[in-house]
Amino acid sequence: MTALLLDVRDLRVSFPMANGMTEAVRGVSFSVAPGEAIGIVGESGSGKSVSALAVMRLVAQPGRITGGEILFEGRDLAALDEKAMRTVRGRHISMVFQDPLSSLNPAFTIGQQLVDTVRAHRPAATREAARDRAVEVLELVGITEAGRRLTSYPHEFSGGMRQRVMIALAIACEPKLLIADEPTTALDVTIQAQVVALLWQLREKLGLSVLFISHNLDLVAEICDRVYVMHTGNVVEHGDVEDIFLRPQHSYTRMLQNCIPRIEGVQPWSAAARSSTGEVAP
Amino acid sequence: MTSQREPEILLEFVKARKEFVLDDGLINRLTGKRRLLRALDDVSLTVRRGEIVGLVGESGSGKSTLAQAAVRLLTVDEGYVNYRGENLASARGRALKDFRRSVQMVFQDTGSSLNPRKTVGRALDESLALRGLARARRAERSNELLDVVGLNGALRQRYPHQLSGGQRQRVAIARCLALEPEFLVADEPVASLDVSLQSQIIKLLLKLRNELGLTLLFISHDLALVSHISTRVAVMHAGRIVEEGPPETVLRSPSDPYTRALLAAIPKGIKGRRARRESALLAVSAPKEAAE
Amino acid sequence: MSVAERPLAEASRVMAALQRIWQGARLNWATTTGAVIVLVAVGAAIFAPLIAPYDPIEVAIENKLLPPSAEFWLGTDHGGRDILSRVIWGARASLTVSLLAVAIGVTGGVLIGLFAAYHSGSWVEQIVMRAIDAIASIPLLIWAIAIIGIVGVDSVDIGPFTFTNVHKLLILIGLLYMPTLARITHAVAQVEMTSDYVKARRVQGAGNLAIMFGDVLPNCLSPLIVQATLLVAIGIVVEASVSFVGLGVQPPTPSWGSMLADARNYVFSGEWWMPVFPGAAISLTVVGFNLLGDGLRDVLDPRRSTGRLLT
């Protein structure tokens, strides 16, 4: 059996509130094997984003990881100090966020941001080499005339293009794992389809492993191999995507399935097929 | 052609045009460098009494502008927007007051559609005051309204931030109902809610429509959702209505390429996954470049 | 609810608000300290005739320049007057000027700011805001000293009203407070006017005045309150400064500033109690208002109770 790339065991994350500590993540375990695409599905408050941030050790202060292990290639990330963690972030594990507008620095060109990222992890690289890598990676994500676009600012791009730039930033240093936290939620559905296709493409081309977090079960089912369903800080169900989608065991998963309105022409395959929006009087 | 008379036309857009000025400013005005954004481009749309018209559009399609024009939060530059035959732009006094009572709007962002400094009770009282209800009867009526939307009267003391997103949206709907409208414009009413809450709010809207005889203009980016609940679907793109018709027709035999692109882009779950796998195995050419 | 229940409901609302304030105070020592200081200062100003041990004006040369003792807790000044009593009475001058000046500034500033925000995007707004900018460019202290220097320190009679020097001072200060408050109101109001809840009120048919004062203004309160308390603090210092140069409160009426002026000659001769106590009164009151302002802003924000972490 190939060693797991990411193995999260019994993760616990807590935040101090006015009346004590609140656990946002309560003993969650999930894993990603090399080359796999894993989905974490849940609604707001389920703890899915916090879990992803915990892997990157980016949980907002004063929240803390209060338990569990985060084994990346055998190393426990939860035990690393900040300095060591910085060598992991961006280089071995990268992250793409929901809102590309606030994730890119509006004051710098995308070329500058790409070059900075490359040189942060490869200080020996020359400006030339970093610039070449920036162009290469922009082309990989499907941005035409990449060389010219290096001098553009984030606000000159549309939402979908900005998300592509974010992905480019994320893969610039050839990470093994890409965590995508609701990367398409803020995008139009046509653009969403393009970004999802891009992620699929990159998986094939670069052998990238993906941890995809979303509230959209249909979206996750399209591109992930295995799915974890989270609810109020716990994983309530997990398994192969076809099992979760077609034969959901847990009542919450089934509820999620039932609530998604789907085009009538495309039959959802689970038993409780129709979405429960009620009869429409003629 | 049916022998019955068709239901009365309530809302009507006739070749409506609305442009917004970008890069405004004295210098740009003088040098002619202002850009114009055409949010509504010759839009014609009719909503008859009793219908549920679903308007589908993505960001930048002009759907929000259309929604605002429908409730006269803005007026169009060319063309007409009429309600029951009255031109909204020129409505004054009594006619405008009647319009403001008859047509109400449910907003997308539950966090900002309720004044954060007003309790639920106070917001409802103010709406009832606008309806003309005597002060003494307002408390009772607001309890009734909360009951209709499925909320406990005890919530009247709460502030919006003390409610969940779903509760806030129900309060927003109750606030609309306080005016006893006949027409409801819902601008992405469930977009900011979790999927489990979405169906609850949709059910509520449909129940109210059936019980109170409301007419709905339901605006959303979600074609699947809209097709489930509408009696008629209109698709909007770049300020124009590119497709219109009964849901089945729009879904199964769309005539417009944009509608077809929308349908193709919707995630299809397992079926989509298998299709993707197959196309990868057949080594079909790479997905199209972003045409932006 | 029935007619009989209504006063009860009102009372319980007030109790709930007081309870929120009390709970806020318990969590936040800084605000409590500020509140206590302000209460003491205001109490001194109001109850001066009752709590001051001695007459602050009557001269008694035989007692002059006595250090603090059991008889005169804070010592006496060059006229033999009890410093404690003068400090207590002095609170009146300082607080009258600063509080009323802020009241004038807030009233005028808020109205101007709302007016400008209402006309957002038009030339009316531009003219109003540029006029505000012009007034804002006038330095406060110099303005006060210059105007009173020109007009003189005597009382002025306009119609049936008599304006003492103190009145003149607080009007002058209030006028120059308006720009800051107008700008804050204008900026926040502009943003709030684009929000959905304002749109919702419009759709419901609410009138523009009702929207501006009932919906927009309450959401501008938070930064306004903080600024207002800061301005009270500034007002205290301005009054003290103007009185220090003899153009504010006229002798023999006690004022912290004029007490400092009197103490000028005695700073190096060993009568430390003359400058120290009025100076401390000024500093403490200023700090008190600042702390209170921070705390009030937080307590009055209904959003405070969710998700705010302990500081």
Image (spheres, grey):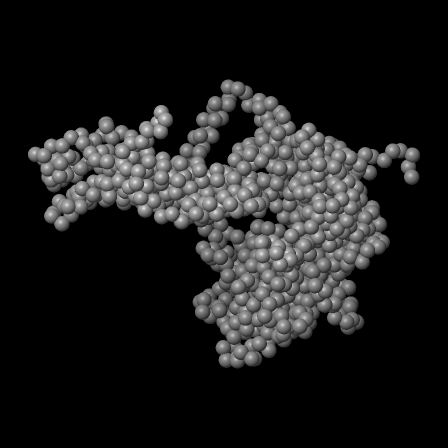
Question: Given the current orientation, which residue lies at the most extreme left position?
Answer: C62
Question: Given the current orientation, which residue lies at the most extreme top position?
Answer: C4
Res B222 visible? no
Left or right for A12, reference A167: left
Left or right for C23, reference A23: left
* Residue at left offset 66%, top offset 41%: B73
* Residue at left offset 75%, top offset 42%: B80
Quadrant for residue A230, please give it.
Answer: bottom right
Question: Given the current orientation, which residue lies at the most extreme front position?
Answer: C150
Q: Position of residue A154 (x, y in %)?
A: 59, 63
Res C68 visible? yes
Q: Position of residue A26 (x, y in %)?
A: 53, 54
Q: Quadrant of the N terminus of chain C?
A: top right
Above-or-below relation of A125 to C273:
below
* Residue at left offset 39%, top offset 43%: C176
Left or right for B279, reference A152: right
Out of A144 and A60, give the one closest to the viewer: A144
Above-or-below relation of B254 to C206:
below
Above-or-below relation of C264 to A82:
above
Q: Position of residue B68 (x, y in %)?
A: 68, 43
Out of B30 and A204, give the one closest to the viewer: B30
* Residue at left offset 20%, top offset 43%: C261
